[in-house]
Image (tube, rainbow, N blue to C red):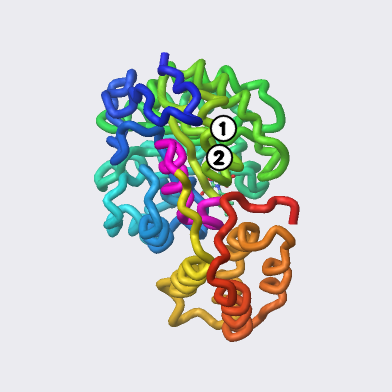
Amino acid sequence: MQQAHKPFSSAPLHPCCLNDKSLTGHDIPRSLHPSLPLTALAPMQDVTNLWFMKVIAHYGSPDYFFTEYFRVNDTSRLNRHILASITENDTGHPVFAQMIGESIPDLVRTAKELCSYNIAGVDLNLGCPAPRIYRKNVGGGLLLLPEKVDRILGELRQAVNDRPLTVKMRVGFENTDNFYEILDMINRHSIDLLSLHGRTVKDMYHGAVKYDLIGEAVRRVHCPVLANGNIHSAKTALEVLSQTGAAGVMVGRWAIGNPWLFNQIRQALRGEAIAPVPLVEVRNYIERLWQTPTAATMPERARVGYLKMFLNYIALSIDAEGHFLRLMRQTQTEAELFNLCDRILLTDLTKTLALAPSLSV
Ligand SMILES: Cc1cc2nc3c(=O)[nH]c(=O)nc-3n(C[C@H](O)[C@H](O)[C@H](O)COP(=O)(O)O)c2cc1C
C-alpha cells in the first residue's frame, strides 16, 4: 500500500515513496522537489499546448505536464500539434502523453508509437464528460463499461512494458457503482499513477468535489494518486492533501487563473509565507497570453475571444465583486481589452492577486 501522507499544514516534509521505484516496478519521473508532494498541470484541450506549458513553467512549473488528449481510432495519426508539446518541450519537466479512445488495437498501436518519443508515460483518459465524446464509449463513457476498461488496461500494460502507464479518471459516470471495481483493475494491471477528479461524468465541472472518495482511492490502490478538482489555492491544496493522503495534486483551471499557484503550493508546503503577486505582474501575464504562437494569423475578434477564455479565470482573483470580469466580457477589441486591463491592474501598484479566486461572482 502506498504510504499515506499525513497533514502538511505546518511540517512540510513527509516520507515520499514516489521517487523510488513505484510498487508496480515502473519509474515515474523524479520530482525536482523530492521532499514535497507532487504537482501536475491537468490536461486541458485547447489550453495545455506547448506554448501554455512554457508560460506556466515561466511562473513556476509543476512537476508533471500532461498533453491534451490524442484521439485514437482506426484512422488516427498522432496530432502533430499535440506531439510538439512533447518533442519541443524545453521546460525540463516530464510530459505524460494522454490518449482517448476505445479501440484496443488502435490504443495499443498509438501507445507504442508514443513510447518512441521522450514521454514520462502513457496516460489513458477515463473521464472526459463531453456528451459527443462519452456517447462513443470513450473517455468518461468507459466508466460504464468496466469489462472493456479491464481489457484495455490489460492490453495497454503489455504494450507499455518499459515505462509508466497511467490513468486519469472520474469517480464514476453518474454514481460510484463501478468505482471500486475499476480501482481494483488499476491494481491488477499495475497502473503506475492515478489522477482522480473527484466528480462523476454527469457532474461535469460543477458541484462539490468528493475528496472523501479520492481518499478511499488513495487507500485502495497501490500506485500514487494525484487529487484533482477545484484545487484553486495553496490552502486548498494543503487541505486536500491532508484530507485524502494523496501523493500530490493536479490543477487545471485554477492554474490558468493563477500561474504562480504551483510555486505558492510549494511555499505553503514548506511552511513559508506565500508571496503575493502584484497586479502589475498579472498585467504582464495577460500580455504573455496575448502572444499566442498563432497570433499573427488570428483575426482580432478571435484573438480577443481566446484571451477572454483565460481572463474568465484570472478575473476571479482580481476583485471579489466581479467588476473586472463583467467589464472584460463587454470588450470586443484589443484596445478596449488592454485599456481595461491597464485601468484595473496598473492604477494601484499596491494591489495584489487574491490567494484564492472568488467563486461567487
Ligand atoms: C477546457 C478544459 C479542457 C479539458 N481537457 C481535458 C483533457 O484533454 N483531458 C483530460 O483528462 N481532462 C481534461 N479536462 C479536465 C481537467 O483535466 C480537470 O480534470 C478538470 O478541469 C478538474 O480540475 P480543475 O478543477 O483543477 O480544473 C479539461 C478541462 C477543461 C476545463
Q: Is residue 74 above or below residue 24?
A: below
Sort mark 2 into few (<14), some (14-19) or many (20+) by Cα contacts within 10 Å. Answer: some
Report the amino acid beneath label 1.
Glu
* 257 inside magenta stretch: yes
Quarter of the figure with the C terminus? bottom right
Work out how far the residue at label 2 is from the one at label 1, CA to CA, in angstroms: 6 Å
The residue to which callout 2 is attached is: 235
Residue 124, numbered label: none
- Residue 145 in the image: state x and y as whole percent: 60, 27
* 92 inside magenta stretch: no
Element type at mark 1: helix
- Residue 132 in the image: state x and y as whole percent: 65, 49
Name the residue rendered at 59%, 77% in the picture: 347
305 with respect to 113 (left or right): right
14 with respect to 214 (left or right): left
Name the residue rendered at 62%, 22% in the picture: 178
**Pointers 2 and 1 in contact (CB under 8 A)?**
yes
What is the number of callouts on the image? 2
Q: Nearer the viewer, residue 58 or 161?
A: 58
Q: Is residue 78 above or below residue 208?
A: below
Element type at mark 2: helix
What range is drawn magenta here? 254-272
| Residue 272, image quadrant | top left
Q: Nearer the viewer, residue 342 or 191?
A: 342
Quarter of the figure with the N terminus? top left
Residue 239, numbered label: 1
